[in-house]
Amino acid sequence: MKVGQGGEGWRGAFALAVLAAAVGALAQPRPTPSGIYTCVDDKGKRITSDRPIPECTAKEQRVLNKDGSLKAVHPPTLTADERSEKEAKEKKEAEARAAQADAVRRDRNLKARYPSEESHAKAREAALDSVRLAIKNSEQRLKDLTAERKPLLDEAEFYVGKPLPAKLRQAIDANDAATEAQRSSMANQQAEMVRINKFYDSELDRLRRLWAGAQPGTLGPLDAPVAPR
């Protein structure tokens, strides 16, 4: 009997403890809402709640303080397509800002590199000098090849109407190939001269505007070929 009474007493004490815990939980004050959410639904009805409003996920929701003042604004929840469009727009804007910053930097560097028209002219001449030297070497090589070709042609006159000896034919062919290569090289060098002058002309036009007071980054892209090597 004593053992049974002890078991009943234990169960009663446990039930009282559970009841006390439940009452204590109910007695705890409910958390104060972080704000008052308000929005206007698709039908034009204003909805107010102490938490985000499901009917207005696609709309702007204003969060008010207890005194009715504005605490925050929650933007609409975007769809997948809207989110992708927003991200693409933000990426494009970031790229535009980076390009603008790069344009400012390049203009500042250009102006610092060439403080005067004289310094820019010296840079142009230095770039052209290497090409002029290459053209001069090609011209000399062409003269040498012409001189080397004359005795070969003189010798070939002995074989008019006959096949040329293999060694002579090879020498003439090699001279022809070398001459053509030098002429092609000269044409490329002359094109390079034009390209260099066009680059420095465009750069000088930009510099003159910068020297006159134009703000770096406001002149658009440099309309010129790639800088000389």
Image (cartoon, grey):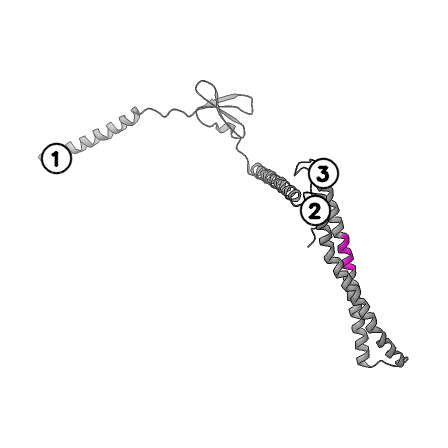
Q: Which residue is at a point 48% across and 29% down the rendered structure image?
A: 54
Are discs 2 and 1 less than 8 Å apart at CB?
no
Label located before the other in sequence (3 or 1): 1
Residue in view at x 82 percent, y 81 percent: 165
Dot label at residue 209: 3
Foreground: 194 or 5? 194
Q: Mark 3: which amino acid?
A: Arg
| Highlighted range, magenta | 187-194
Q: Is residue 125 visible?
A: yes
Quickly name the residue at label 2.
119
Q: Considering the numbered disc 3 on the image, is that residue within a helix, a strand or a loop?
A: helix
Q: Secondary structure at mark 2?
A: helix
Left or right, residue 26 beside residue 203? left
In the rendered view, does 16 fall on the left or right side of 78?
Answer: left
- Find out whether the residues at labels 3 and 2 contact each other: C-beta distance under 8 Å: no
Tell me if residue 190 is in the magenta stretch.
Answer: yes
Magenta stretch: helix, strand or loop mostly: helix
**Does residue 50 lie above or below 224 as drawn?**
above
Residue pointed to by mark 1: 4
Query: Which quadrant of the structure image shows residue 101?
Result: top right
Q: Which residue occupies the foreground of this view, 44 or 165? A: 165
